[in-house]
Amino acid sequence: MASEEVLKAVFPFLESVDLASCMSVSKQWNDIARDDFFWKCLCGKRWPSICKRPNPPSVTYYQLYKTFHKRQHRRTLLPPRISFDDLEFFIDIWAENTLLFSEVVPGSVLQTGFKIPPSGVCDLLKYNLEGSEYKMTFPVEPRFTIPSGQNQNVSVSVMVGRKDSNKVARVINKSMFDYIDRSSYRALAFDYLDISPGYPFTTGIRAWISLLFMEDGNEDLMHVFGIQMDFCDVANSKEEVLWLLDILDWK
């Protein structure tokens, strides 16, 4: 039996990784292993219904198997179409009818965050500030104080503006800081993003905002020294955050 006939008799019984390895042995083996019949056999094991058609739904069964046999890993994002320099955030915090904080925060400032956490910050909060997740943090000056237990009366609204198109989108709409994580000294609020109608299957994404505070030995008062915002449900890098902001419902 000629060597080519032996290979053609053996190759149909190989798994895909072994058949692919045979393609790198020599030109002869490569030519034989590329025979679409062998790859049709592999496709038939994984997707029997596809092989009921007289011809493959793609160019070849080899190309079909090569493209779809593995779960797609996260693809590299294209460069975002906007930058933090194009953005400014309008942040307003209320305690019932009293305005506690109202600032226009440039995107570049929000992106930069804390260089050095202020003294007196607990270790767990310091770990949160220095963590690998992409969170945008900026200091509050002057600091403001919230009586402990009244955080549920404190609300926040966040709008974001684009200087390149003079459009505005809503990020958070009058959400309450109804949860306090005392282990890391954060009061948290969230809202669901308004995504552009052009992306109908992108829903349920939350924007989180946290008040970072210290108690300074008085558990009855929360001294807020910083504000942190993130979209860590889906976006954990600068590029992912910018792409997410780009698909908001800008008006």
Image (cartoon, helix red, strand yellow):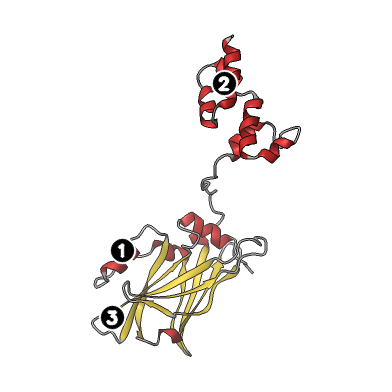
| Amino acid type, callout 3 | Glu
Whether residue 246 is visible here, answered yes or no, is yes
| Amino acid type, callout 2 | Val
Residue 49, how many percent across, how many down? Answer: 70, 40
**Among numbered discs 1 and 3, the one appearing first in the sequence:** 1
Whether residue 109 is visible here, answered yes or no, is no
The local secondary structure at tag 1 comes to helix
The local secondary structure at tag 2 comes to helix
Q: Which residue is mark 2?
A: 10
Q: Nearer the viewer, residue 1 or 239?
A: 1
**Picture quadrant of residue 81:** bottom right
Residue 77, how many percent across, how many down? Answer: 53, 49
Q: Which mark is residue 94?
A: none
Between marks 1 and 2, how big is the CA–CA gap?
57 Å
Q: Residue furthest bottom?
A: 97
* Residue at image location 66% in from the left, 62% down from the top: 200
Q: Which mark is residue 215?
A: 3
Look at the picture and state if 174 lies above or below 48.
Answer: below
Between marks 2 and 3, how big is the CA–CA gap?
73 Å
Q: Which residue is mark 1?
A: 127
Residues under numbered marks 1 and 3 in contact, where contact means CB atoms less than 8 Å apart: no
Look at the picture and state if 220 lies above or below 191.
Answer: below
Between marks 1 and 3, how big is the CA–CA gap?
18 Å
Residue 221, how many percent across, how many down? Answer: 31, 85
